[in-house]
Amino acid sequence: MTAAPLPEPGRSVQVRVPATSANLGPGFDTLGLALSVYDELVVTALPPGQLEVDVDGEGMGDVPRDGSNLVVRSIAYAFEAAGRRMPGLRLQAHNVIPHGRGMGSSGAAVVSGLLAAKGLLSGDVELGPETLLRLATELEGHPDNVAPALFGGLTIAWVDETGPQHKKLTVHRGVSPLVFVPESTMSTSVARSLQPLQVPREDAVFNVSRSALLIAALTQSPELLLAATEDKLHQSYRAQAMPDTDRLVQALRARGFAAVVSGAGPSVLVLADGPGRRLEAAALVSDAVDTPWESLMLAVDVKGGTVREYAEGST
């Protein structure tokens, strides 16, 4: 039997993947939103055994530059799943998504690697949307961040007997996201460890109602966002590890803003019901909060991750 061909040395693909915010308050491990902050990378096939990793931007100096790099591991995972030999790689990454801040940086790295593999394998093995979501979930552990990173928009993610699934929804044009990013970081595993394994029945019912309402608020009725982003499953349990985050969320909500912990934190996501309200939230934080927060006024990304052939000098 003839061995499957390796990607031709010198073949390059360019990948672009958005940041994400998961949970959105009540939608724990289920809801995610793609945001207009992007990691970009160029991946070039080299002869087998060679590996070059160059990282600038977020994580420069901290992100591994060997085979333990999460993007490299994700590429290798996709090649193994496709039954193909891994080529050598040159990876040139420009990272913009903040690391350890609850904006989906690890999910973006996983999706970046899988899309790079998709591009390099194109014409030999086709990795479809369902396969990409399955591989991304296996690598990340849960689909709430990787689904919006792959597909864009607002996503509902769940897992059934056939594997991870998703539904993409269009966000109402009046919804204006704003993310407040602190200097501190938070480990997702630490944040998850603070939650109890069981919650009171009334808290579970509370979150079911708010999650259902949040879908309506984000797609049809942004004026309901404050009520729809109430949560009793995870944010209060994590507050002890992120006191500045908790104070900011409470201060914003007291003024009528739909503020929630972004993912595992410590960033704060505000889902404003219009550009004017978003400016009001930014001004409130600038004037009334001692801890420094970087304000990111963003759009909802509707495309998700993309991959295309890359030629030196192209844009």
Image: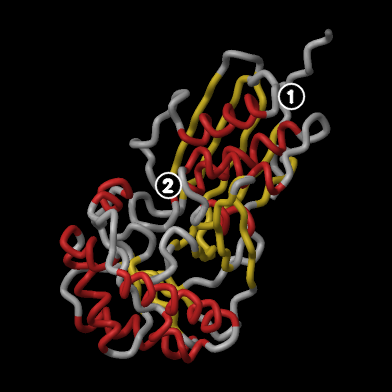
Quarter the N terminus occupies: top right
Vertical position of residue 297 compared to residue 197: above or below: below
Task: Name the spot of residue 44 as percent of width and height, x first.
Answer: 65, 30
Query: At 70% across and 48% down in the image, what residue appears?
Result: 129
Residue ID at (37%, 50%): 99
Element under disc 1 = loop
Could you tell me which residue is drawn at 56 percent across and 47 percent down? 40
The crowd level at tag 2 (other Cα within 10 Å; few <14, some 14-19, many 20+) is: few
Q: Secondary structure at mark 2?
A: strand
Q: Quadrant of residue 120?
A: top right
Residue 84 appears left or right of 290: right
Between 208 and 222, the residue placed more toward the observer is 208
Q: Which residue is mark 2?
A: 57
Expressed as whole percent of the image width and height from the top left, the position of residue 167 reads 64, 63
Toward the front, the furthest residue is 201
Residue shown at the point (48%, 86%) measured from the top left: 275
Task: Residue 158 in the image: state x and y as whole percent.
Answer: 55, 56
Q: Earlier in the sequence, mark 2 or mark 1?
A: 1
State whether residue 242 is above or below residue 274.
above
| Residue nearest the viewer, comparing 310 with 218 | 218
Q: Distance from label 2 to label 1 (Cα)?
A: 28 Å
- The coloring applied to the image is secondary structure
Q: Which residue position holds label 1?
A: 7
Which amino acid does the dot numbered 2 rest on? Gly
